Image: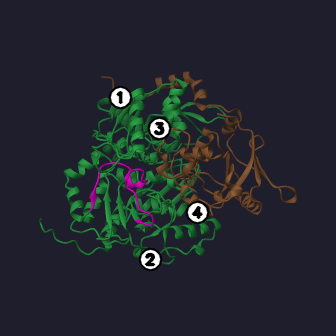
Chain colours: A brown, B green
Amino acid sequence: MDKFTTHTGVGVPLRRSNVDTDQIIPAVYLKRVTRAGFEDGLFAAWRNDPTFVLNNEAYAAGSVLVAGPDFGTGSSREHAVWALQNYGFKAVISPRFGDIFRGNSGKAGLVAAQVDEKVVQRLWDHLEEHPGATVTVDLESRTVRAGEGVDAIEDSFDIDDYTRWRLLEGLDDIGITLGNEADISSYEQTRPRWKPATIHAS
Amino acid sequence: MGRTLSEKVWDEHVVRSNEGEPDLLYIDLHLIHEVTSPQAFDGLRLAGRTVRRPDLTLATEDHNVPTIDWDKPIADPVSKTQVDTLRRNTEEFGVRLHPLGDIEQGIVHIIGPQLGLTQPGMTIVCGDSHTSTHGAFGAIAFGIGTSEVEHVLATQTLMQAKPKTMSVTINGSLPPGVTAKDMVLTLIAHTGTGGGQGYIVEYRGQAIEELSMEGRMTVCNMSIEWGAKAGLIAPDQTTFDYIEGRPEAPKGADWDAAVAHWKSLVTDDDAVFDEEIVLDASEMTPFVTWGTNPGQGVPLGGAVPFPEQFEDDQDRIAAENALRYMGLEAGTPMREVKVDTVFIGSCTNGRIEDLRLAAEILEGHKVDPNTRLLVVPGSVRVRLQAQEEGLDVIFKEAGAEWRGAGCSMCLGMNPDTLEPGERSASTSNRNFEGRQGKGGRTHLVSVPVAAATAIRGTLSSPADLEPALTSTGS
């Protein structure tokens, strides 16, 4: 996984709450067996609508999505994270994320930055007034920034310490866990014999 | 201070715990299906890793599979590739698979409990958000993404920050005709889709204790729909009776040892939850959704709400969007909403009790000529059981389509989908835009409401039905 320290890119105001993972990528697009190429399914239903934000030239090359509360609820499909990444998004800003989506983002290297709802409102207003304006997501200082001068927006965001550290270092979870393989083996010695198994010694 | 049920189960599975790090949790059972696993197996291959515990892993084919002509090759080439990929991966890595055509095939959350693999006090994960279903047995069970699937395959563990705890106490008894589904839809309308976010929820109280295991599974299944990490119910005699004698249940002395342990899996009297919700089951009625998330629901006797009733800006905008998408006018009584397709099935309501309940209501009635009824059993075993009891005959005589096992129209990854603008009453778990097919409009309902709706062609409860016709004995 690539290291993530800070990213500045075009901000995309998605003025919607409860954007579930079926909206991010409908199930019919989940049939691929690779991790790439899911960008065509991103917000598939909405992209048919000419007024949808990503169909506006100014936002089309966006890389920081600014969404309403409860972004990424619903299905556990990590394809939702891959679709955002395949399209070019590096970070999503929202007042509240679906648990599994936030977890998947951390594993796949997409920054899910949780901010106060007022910050999202201000970012939406700013990005709509200045289409194509950029937003900075600084993981080191845990801040989001946009705009300049008296109207500048700067606020902190929440991301758990461990995920932040892993993203900053670009570390692979499985490698870290396998470093503690001895702990797993000794735990396995303590499991009761009546716990079920799917395969039985014949 | 005492501990809650979920804390007890959590603590029993901690492999490693360090300040400032998530806990490393051992996973007792890893369920796998074709959609969220191919990239995980690829990751293992790329890193030269193996599946650490194939004996704690079980795979089946459910999301993509057709529910007609299942003995023929899968027609959609992309679906076929995904299913074939699962077959190759499970073969290569030595994982037990119940493929299409196998007697144990079915929706992953139906077959775990059915085989007796789902037991109290376990940790169970699957690359599917409705893994919360297994919490009905007093297990910590939750959905994971594909990166985590790979992590569990490689290590049989997961790194997890310990969630907060919440209790949902449902006092009283459900009135006749009101089901576990109505109970959970009522709860979600009360909390909103984000209300459980960050919590493991324990459902308790008289109304929960009075539910069958199948009803408890329906409630736990929808935990994710209000954002909870997991939902669980303390195991009791109902739980033990359900498990005993199943193929993978402990036997003999192992059974006694297991039950002795399971009986300790209750929240201590002096334990404290971080959050508590209390509801009264006796006030509940059949409940249906009008919008595009599971929290947008009202009693069947109610009406489509006016967006301006919502004080919160986001809720109001969401309601406006939902009414536009659903093609509904505010103020319309829910009972006047006309339905094109009724879907009975899914990991929420695709078990044998659901089919029995549906058949009881449909017997002697005919499906409305302008409505289509799809009955999709959750597993092959459920299908065979229903046929043994003659339920399939009742369905077919009523004019329903009796299908093979799978996820089917719950998410429309197979050919069972809604057409654009088509409206369904569905016993599944999600009414998201396009969930059952692009442009499709979904109302989430209980099994009795689904069956009555199929007969009347508008959202209905069994109380709205004319008496059944006497059988002609044809």
Q: Is residue B27 above or below residue B5?
A: above
Q: Which disc number belongs to residue A49?
A: 4
Q: Which residue is mark 2?
A: B333
Q: CA distance from mark 2 to mark 3?
A: 44 Å
Q: Tell me the element at label 2.
A: loop
Q: Residue at x 29, y 61 (%)?
A: B358
Please check the rendered image and state whether residue B187 is part of the magenta-colored stretch, yes or no: no
Residue B377 horizontal/vertical position (percent):
31, 52
Instruction: Please state if B458 lies on the left or on the right of A136 as rendered.
Output: left
Q: Which disc number belongs to residue A199?
A: 1
Q: Is residue B432 above or below residue A61?
A: below
10 Å crowding of disc 3: few (<14), some (14-19), many (20+): many
Q: Tell me the element at label 1.
A: loop
Mark 2 — on which chain does it sit? B
Q: Is residue B161 visible?
A: yes
Mark 1 — on which chain does it sit? A
Q: Name the image quarter holding residue B252.
A: top left
Q: Which residue is mark 3?
A: B37
Residue B69 horizontal/vertical position (percent):
28, 48
* Three-letter amino acid code of the residue under disc 1: Ile
Q: Name the image quarter holding residue B171.
A: bottom left
Mark 4 — on which chain does it sit? A
Q: CA distance from mark 4 to mark 1?
A: 50 Å
Q: Is residue A147 above or below residue B116?
A: below
* Three-letter amino acid code of the residue under disc 3: Ser
Q: Which residues are magenta?
A: B400-423
- The nearer-to-camera label among 3 and 4 is 4
